[in-house]
Image (cartoon, rainbow, N blue to C red):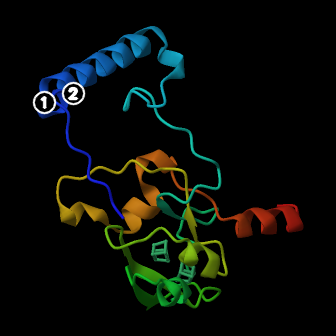
Amino acid sequence: MSIVKKPGAISNWYLPGIISGMIFTLRKMIYNIFHKDKMPTLNYPEEKYEYSPRFKGQHVLTVKKDGSIRCTACMLCATNCPAQCIKIVAAESEDPSVEKYPINYEIDVLRCVYCGYCEEACPVDAIRMGPEWQKPGANGSNFTYDIQELAYRPQLKGGIESRLDEQERHDFGI
Ligand code: SF4
Ligand code: SF4
C-alpha cells in the first residue's frame, strides 16, 4: 500500500530549494578554489589525462627501415574489422621480395569502434593503435585517414618502425 504524503507549507515554495542549492554550489566552488589538487576534474586542454601505454587510440601504419610502408595488403585487418571501416586498394610491388602493397589504405575513424581487432589480426605488425586520442576536425571528410595521415603524420616523426624489422635487424646483427 502506498502512502501519499501531503506536502507541507514550505515545500509549496520553490525558493527554499533554490537558495539551498545555490548555497551548496557556492560552498563547493569555494572549497575547489582552495583545494585544486583534490578536484576530480582536469582543466582541459591545459591539463591532460595520461592514459595507460596499452590504451588503444589513434591508428599507426608502421614503416620498414627504408621508410616504406610495412603493410602487405593481405586484407586481414579489413576482414576482421567489425565496423567495416578499413578500405584497402592493393597493387603488385616492383620489389620481387614483396608480393603486394597498399596503394590506398583508409580508415574511417567515425565508424571505428577502437576495438583493436585490426592490430590483433595483422601478421606483420603493420598496424598499431597508439596513445594519441585528440584528433579534432572541422567536418566529416577530415575523419577518413589515408596512408599519409596513418604512417607519416608529423607526430610520428618520420614513421614508427615495425617490430618485425627491428627483430630481423637484431637476429641478423645488421
Ligand atoms: S579498431 Fe576495430 S573498428 Fe577500428 S579499424 Fe580496427 S578493427 Fe576496425
Ligand atoms: S595492416 Fe596488416 S593485416 Fe592489414 S592489410 Fe596490412 S599487413 Fe594485412
Q: Amino acid at mark 2?
A: Gly
- Secondary structure, mark 1, is loop
Q: Which mark is residue 14?
A: 1
Q: What separation in Å lies between label 2 and label 1 (alpha carbons)?
A: 6 Å
Foreground pick, 35 / 124: 35
Does the closest atom of ligand 1 sit within 8 Å of the Cβ of label 2?
Answer: no
Q: Position of residue 153 (x, y in %)?
A: 41, 53
Please state the horizontal and vertical placement of residue 59, each as a whole percent of the image: 48, 63
Badge 1 crowding class, 10 Å Cα cut-off, few under 14, some 14 to 19, many 20 or more, is few
Q: Is residue 12 in view? A: yes
Q: Secondary structure at mark 2?
A: helix
In front of the other: 160 or 18: 18
Q: Percent x, y for residue 55?
A: 58, 55
Question: Is 155 or 43 nearer to us in this picture?
Answer: 43
98 left or right, relative to 12: right
Amino acid type for the residue under numbered disc 1: Tyr
Residue 83 picture quarter: bottom left
- Residue at x 44%, y 28% (from the top left corner): 47
Q: Quadrant of the C terminus?
A: bottom right
Residue beneath the point at 45% across and 81% down? 102
Q: Are marks 2 and 1 in contact (CB under 8 Å)?
A: yes
Q: Where is mark 2, residue-wise?
A: 17
**Dot label at residue 165:** none
Q: Which residue appears at 37% of the width and 10% of the height? A: 30
Q: Residue at x 62, y 66 (%)?
A: 64
Quadrant where the N terminus is found in the figure: bottom left
Give the class, few, some or many, for how many residues have Cα within 10 Å of label 2's Cα (few <14, many ≥20).
few
69 in relation to 166, above or below:
below
